[in-house]
Amino acid sequence: MLRCHDVSVAYDGLKAIENVSIEVPAHQTVGIVGPNGAGKTSLLHGVCGIVPLAGGTVVFDEEDVTGRPTPDLVRRGISLVPAARELFPNLSVHKNLRLGAHTHLSSRQGRTQAAADLERVLEMFPILRERGNQAAGSLSGGQQQMVAIGRALMARPRLLVLDEPSLGLAPLVLGEIFDALHNLVASSDVSVLLVEQNAELTTAFVDYVYVLDSGRVVNGGPASEMTRDDIARAYMGAEA
């Protein structure tokens, strides 16, 4: 589904990631873990067209999408849930969610699909039904993360990209969110690319995990086969 080959991202001439190659097969969940500053978010931003690539290629559904703008990638089926969530705090929960469907609202069929998609999101996160008319900025951090994920799903993605979804969240609400994501993957054709500092959480959720350190992939393998030592070596800055 998604293949990144020798991808590099640079800021002011300094490379944040260099020659990174990863793959997300269809119907799979893939995680990228690593210490703070490893380049995880830079990789996602390059893949999702938020920052230009300094090298490499991105292929999605067998089509080269390198350098495509973010709105085009959303229409093609890639949706990003940013670490900062980036909600509209003064708009209601329902309005924030509906904004995710903006690419489908030009036709009657699209509007009908959006209504069905909204219902699925509210079934996925029932608390959002209760808070539907409430301003998104007044929600708890966990509920705001649910809105951010739901908004991304309203775009009907085939690849859901999540940047540090556990950031600042209590374990209880984090469990609710990851249970919902697990059910989503099990019951749909959505694949997931997840970036996290929480390696234990990631390996429990994904099928395959890459370890990123200092802008390079230093390890990777099936999550069930990756040991804590494999990942810890990268966090200490040593290749596995």
Image (cartoon, grey):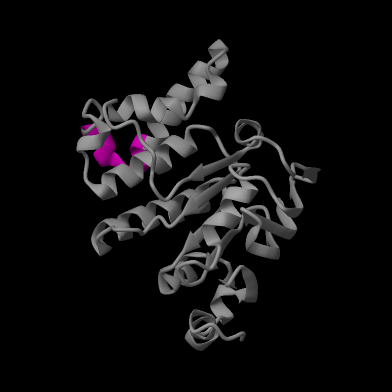
> What predominant SS class does the magenta segment belong to?
helix
Locate residue 238, reporting x and y percent. Answer: 57, 86
- The quarter of the picture where residue 208 lies is bottom right
Q: Is residue 102 left or right of residue 95?
A: right
Locate residue 47, reporting x and y percent. Answer: 64, 49
| Image quadrant occupied by the C terminus | bottom right
Q: Is residue 158 left or right of residue 35?
A: right
**Residue in the image at 61% along x and 42% along y:** 158
Magenta-colored span: 122-130
Of all residues, the one furthest to the front in this rendering is: 12
> In this rendering, is residue 221 above or below 65?
below
Q: Is residue 149 left or right of residue 90?
A: right
**Residue in the image at 69% along x and 58% along y:** 8
- Can residue 125 be found in the magenta stretch? yes
Locate residue 66, reporting x and y percent. Answer: 74, 44
- Can residue 155 be found in the magenta stretch? no
**Residue in the image at 43% along x and 52% along y:** 181
- The quarter of the picture where residue 135 lies is top left
- The quarter of the picture where residue 220 lies is bottom right
> In this rendering, is residue 104 above or below 194?
above
**Residue in the image at 34% along x and 44% along y:** 146
Q: Is residue 114 left or right of residue 210?
A: left
- Total marks shown come to 0
Given residues 22 and 54, the one toward you in this image is: 54
Locate residue 192, reporting x and y percent. Answer: 55, 53
